[in-house]
Image: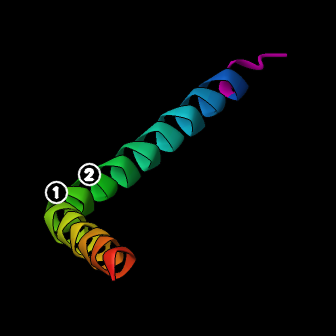
Amino acid sequence: MNFGWIKKNKGQGMVEYILIIAVVVGIVFVAYKTLGKKVKSQFEKATKTIQSADKV
């Protein structure tokens, strides 16, 4: 009996998982680059608001 096709299919499945992970990482990277500055400015604004409220 030749079970070589089982190993071939497992390898193919691993490559598919790696490609899916690579796509997800790419999407996260693009979202970070796109929204990173906006999120940072919102945190800075919130920090300034909290600091000014603390002084009052």
- Residue matched to label 1: 33
Q: Position of residue 35 (x, y in %)?
A: 20, 68
Q: Amino acid at mark 2?
A: Phe
Q: Position of residue 43 (x, y in %)?
A: 29, 68
Tag shown at residue 1? none
How far apart are the alpha carbons under marks 2 and 1? 6 Å
Q: Position of residue 40 (x, y in %)?
A: 22, 63
The residue positioned farthest toward the front in the image shown: 56
- Residue matched to label 2: 29
Q: Are the residues flagged by discs 2 and 1 in contact, CB closer than 8 Å?
A: yes
Image height check: is 31 above or below 50? above
Image height check: is 53 above or below 11? below
Observer-nearest residue: 46 or 39?
46
Give neighbour class at mark 1: few <14, some 14-19, many 20+ (Cα, 10 Å). few
| Rendered image quadrant of residue 42 | bottom left
Q: Amino acid at mark 1?
A: Lys
In this rendering, the count of numbered labels is: 2
Q: Position of residue 7 (x, y in %)?
A: 67, 22
Task: Report the quarter where the C terminus lies.
Answer: bottom left
Give neighbour class at mark 2: few <14, some 14-19, many 20+ (Cα, 10 Å). few
For the point 26% across and 51% down, the residue is: 29
For the point 48% across and 34% down, the residue is: 15
Observer-nearest residue: 28 or 37?
37
Give, as a single range, the part of the protein colored magenta: 1-5
Left or right: 19 in relation to 5: left
Image height check: is 16 above or below 11? below
